Amino acid sequence: MSELKSAYSNINTLKPFYAPGGGIASISSNGEFLAASVLDQVNILQIDINQTDRSIKLYESIENEDEQEITCLQVTPDGSKLCFVNQAQLITIFDIKQSKIVKNFKVSSPSYVMACDELTSNILAIGGTDGSITIYDLNNGYITHSLKGHGGTISSLKIYGELDSEHWFLLSGDTNGVIKVWDLIKSKCLHTMNEHTSAIRGLDMTANKDSNGINTTSWKLISGGRDNVINHFTFTRRKYKLELTIPVHQQIEACGYLANPEYCYAAGGEAIFQIFDSKTGKVVKKTVKPLEELFIVGVLPINSKKDFYLVLSDQSLFRLVDLDDEYFMTKNEEDNEILIDWKIAGNHGTIADMKLVGPKLNKLALATNSPTLRIIPTPPLSSSDNESIIKLDNLYEVEMYEGHSDLLNTLDCTEDGQWIATASKDSSAILWKYDEEYEIFKQYARFEGHAGSVTAIGLPNAVTSGAVPSFLITASNDLTIKKWKIPLSKEDEIIVIKNSEYTRKAHDKDINALDISPNDSIFATASYDKTCKIWNIDDGELVASLSNHKRGLWDVKFCQYDKILATCSGDKTIKLWSLDNYTVMKTLEGHTNAVQRCEFINKNKQVVSSGADGLVKIWDLAEGECLKTLDGHSNRIWSLCVKNDGEEIISADADGVFQFWKDNSIEEELRNLEEEKLKIEQEQSLTNYLRTGDWVNAFLLAMRLDHPMRLYNVLNQCLISANDSDDEYIFNKDVDAVISTLDKDQLITLMKRCRDWNTNARTHLVATKVIKCIIKTHNINKLSELPNMMKLINSIIPYTQRHYTRMDNLVEQSYILDYALIEMDRLL
């Protein structure tokens, strides 16, 4: 068998389930079903959390047939239905359990906010941009209320109570800062509150209780807006009163009461979730403000408001747990931080670079369009992986490590996966170390000294397990390269290194990549100035300059076992260079756009590359030919990494889509051999059937082989051998009977063959006989209902008419010959 890897199968795909612009994600009250949208597609995820394990997996994807983007969505609290609205103002009710759409209807204006009652999950409130509110009964399928009174776009809704109860209210807020309290039993507005000066983004209410804990006829209401304040009201059916105003110092996007209404929460513009004492307005607990400029766009309470999901502007979700009475009894002045229990990534954005990390190399470190280092699990691609550690349904989990203040450009790691180096637009590089005790990465050292964005980075290959890497190489937009010495540090102390061992002016344009040789003696840099340069690691002196590309270079890689260097460029080529004489050995051409990444695989017999054309190509270095093209992306592939010398390939593109590929060359070759063997056996069987005159089995086997000429030969020989005196059958009794039992797909296939044969005068007779047999043995009405049947008939008719005309002319000409013979007889 061939030693080359020539076939890969796609074993898994990780796509974003949440994208910006599609409304805030929604979740059921028990936290089982989470819904979010990507453009016109709605994704439902199922979350399973127990004492020993937790998982999140895609449950259902709903395609919007009219391709209109989703503007708002809402999962009913009981998790039975999903309601969403698109830009065409079409409301869709989807039954989650039955996986089907149960209702569609339109509303009068675009909608960007919805709410569902928490007690029955039956009443849906929809807020419009024209200030109207539509109340819909989900179970019975009709509109119960249409409320008008707001002068601006509805920006917040909350339903309190239930149908047929004594107290059934709706709270609504608009972009003008107006809050209205509606009595849904009497369909009238009880109160209009004008205490805010900007859009209302959070509303909640609860019943006031007396000293015995019994509900009274007054209620407490909390509101939060983009004017950075929270207001606490008390109201009855006759009047309301503003009790307390709390300045929050951030734009409010969500607020409400906790399970214990003595405490309330607010979140928004500073990406901080805060818990306040409802009576004093004092901050009790809060999350830490992230370094990245994010904001919280929504808060999803679950489990009776004891747990929460924070929805952030980068489409990630953070889970907070156990915010109950026991939690607040342990509060103290010094420790008021709320810890994040779990993080989910709805969208990673553009994947600029990635590497396999961790002690088992079973995690992916990502450089994305974010300052945060992200690490996600990978699926078990081979049987050697420990499937109990990484599960297929946990790919949406993410670890986030803060340190940089601007976007990450690239990263590198050691072969054991214990050390990660990240390069950022903030002109710095950070070295991260894996902590085996806590199973997380921690900052080890920070390198500052470049005058521009750090665009390429490299760690040494020869690192003893458990030892600190000896040096770090960085390249920057300031067109320089630097070598940094990595010192030993004390426990939990982050070293800041500002002096490099040397700095060299390297290129005339941006440096896009660098790679260090396997023996750590030289390194190569690839630049937009169309050159690749080789440098001595010890002193930073230039060893050679390679220039043969017509456009800027995107990547460079050393061969592990031979003195070969690979470069890929915007000129759509990959070039292989000899490190003996620094000349081009071979040029690989095949990509239709810039080649972004390349890697040596299969003991350096092959190269895998990815490009801006969205393709991954597998190359044979000996012949310089592309053996396989993997098409799984619709956008530019920025990052590529391989595992086990090419046994597994992972590619990621600008849309945040990951494709996981596994080598199945041996299986494919064995399958091809089996198919070839089966084909030979079938062809021999067909020959035997024809020799013995077994027309039925010959016909069925020719149909199964799907070879038009073999099928024609079978039918033609059957016609030749038929008894001309037997006019009852077209071919013979058995073949006619078989044709009468063909199913729909077989009939369409046979009619397609007749269409093709009918175009040729030599083969049209068999086609005509087959069509006659089909019409004779099948119901004509059922034939006309078959898909594409009438189209096939219409394409057959013109050639049939042509053949008829030709035959008619031949018959006419035969009469002329008879006439000539008769006249000649008279002369004799």
Image (cartoon, grey):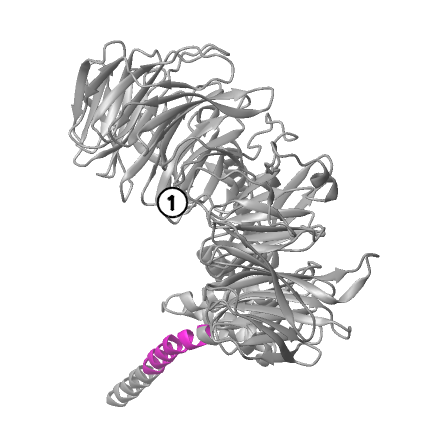
Q: Position of residue 314 (x, y in %)?
A: 46, 47
Q: Is any atom of residue 740 visible in this view?
A: no
Which residue position is annotated with label 1? 654
Residue drawn at (28%, 22%) of the image: 565
Q: Position of residue 166 (x, y in %)?
A: 77, 73
In the displayed structure image, the side of residue 489 where residue 209 appears, left or right: right
Q: Which residues are magenta?
A: 792-810
Looking at this view, is 91 or 691 the one in front? 91
Q: Position of residue 669 (x, y in %)?
A: 49, 34
Main SS of residues in magenta: helix
Looking at this view, is 363 or 747 the one in front? 363
Crowding at dot 1, Cα within 10 Å, few <14 / some 14-19 / many 20+, comes out as: many
SS assignment at label 1: loop
Q: Amino acid at mark 1?
A: Ala
* Residue 266 magenta-highlighted: no
Looking at this view, is 640 or 572 the one in front? 640
Q: Is any atom of residue 459 visible in this view?
A: yes
Q: Quadrant of residue 449?
A: top left
In the displayed structure image, the side of residue 186 where residue 498 appears, left or right: left
